[in-house]
């Protein structure tokens, strides 16, 4: 067991196992690169896989699909995320996924993994320093210029 793997809590191991298990359901006929992801939220663990499309830009990443499943269930706060693929080094989320994860878990713990064994523990701020922030955060009401009368 690697030093990083030894640092995983029981919750983190379960999150990584959820990502590993769901990866088998990825739809990746074009890239042959199935990815599994799991997010732990205040409402539980939600999983996602990458779903490709013949029109390549229409495919979606595992991380964003896990976030979408969590949001659809009412979750609004991501505490941790695990991502796994068959890579030589631990797989990392793309920039778009990092930004989406930041929206719901700006300080989330991140477990990056490979089915071959390598594992890396990090945080979302380390993966996405100086993330884009909205001038108006959700729940702050409507601002001037929203077209809603203030």
Image (cartoon, rainbow, N blue to C red):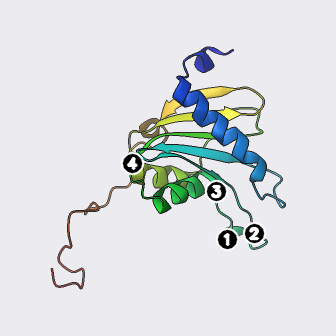
Q: Residue at x 51, y 49 (%)?
A: 98
Instruction: Count the labels in the image.
Output: 4
Which x, y percent locates residue 123? 46, 34
Q: Are marks 1 and 2 in contact (CB under 8 Å)?
A: yes
On the rendered structure, is 85 left or right of 62? Answer: right
State which tag comes first along the sequence, 4 or 2: 2
The residue beneath circle 3 is 61
Query: Which residue corresponds to mark 2?
Result: 53
The N terminus lies in quadrant: top right
Q: Nearer the viewer, residue 23 or 43?
A: 43
Which residue is denoted by mark 4 in the rendering?
77
**Residue 142: x and y, percent?**
21, 73
Quadrant in the picture for the C terminus: bottom left
Q: Give the Cα separation between the discs numbered 1 and 2.
A: 6 Å
Q: CA distance from mark 3 to mark 1?
A: 10 Å
Depth-wise, is mark 3 or mark 4 nearer the camera?
Answer: 4
Residue at 55% x, 22% y: name it.
8
Q: Badge 2 local density, few (<14 within 10 Å), some, or many (20+)?
A: some
Tell me: residue 97, above or below residue 54. above
The residue at the point 46 percent across, 40 percent down is 124
Q: CA distance from mark 3 to mark 2?
A: 11 Å
Residue at point 20%, 63% (across, down): 140
Residue 90 seen in the figure: no
Corner quadrant of residue 54: bottom right
Q: CA distance from mark 3 to mark 4?
A: 19 Å
Marked residue nearer the N-terminal end (3 or 2): 2
Q: Residues within 10 Å of mark 4 (few under 14, many from 20)?
A: many
């Amino acid at each position: 067991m690697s030093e990083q793997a030894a640092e995983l809590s029981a919750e983190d191991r379960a999150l990584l196992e959820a990502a590993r298990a769901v990866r088998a359901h990825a739809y990746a006929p074009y890239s042959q690169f199935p990815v599994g992801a799991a997010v732990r939220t205040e409402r539980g663990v939600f999983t996602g896989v990458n779903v490709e499309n013949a029109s390549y830009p229409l495919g979606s990443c595992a991380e964003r699909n896990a976030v979408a499943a969590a949001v659809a269930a009412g979750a609004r706060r991501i505490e941790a995320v695990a991502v796994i693929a068959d890579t030589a080094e631990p797989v990392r989320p793309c920039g778009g996924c990092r930004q989406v994860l930041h929206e719901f878990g700006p300080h989330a713990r991140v477990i990056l993994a490979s089915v071959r064994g390598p594992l890396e523990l990090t945080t979302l701020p380390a993966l996405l320093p100086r993330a884009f922030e909205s001038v108006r955060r959700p729940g702050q009401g409507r601002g001037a210029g929203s077209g809603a009368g203030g």
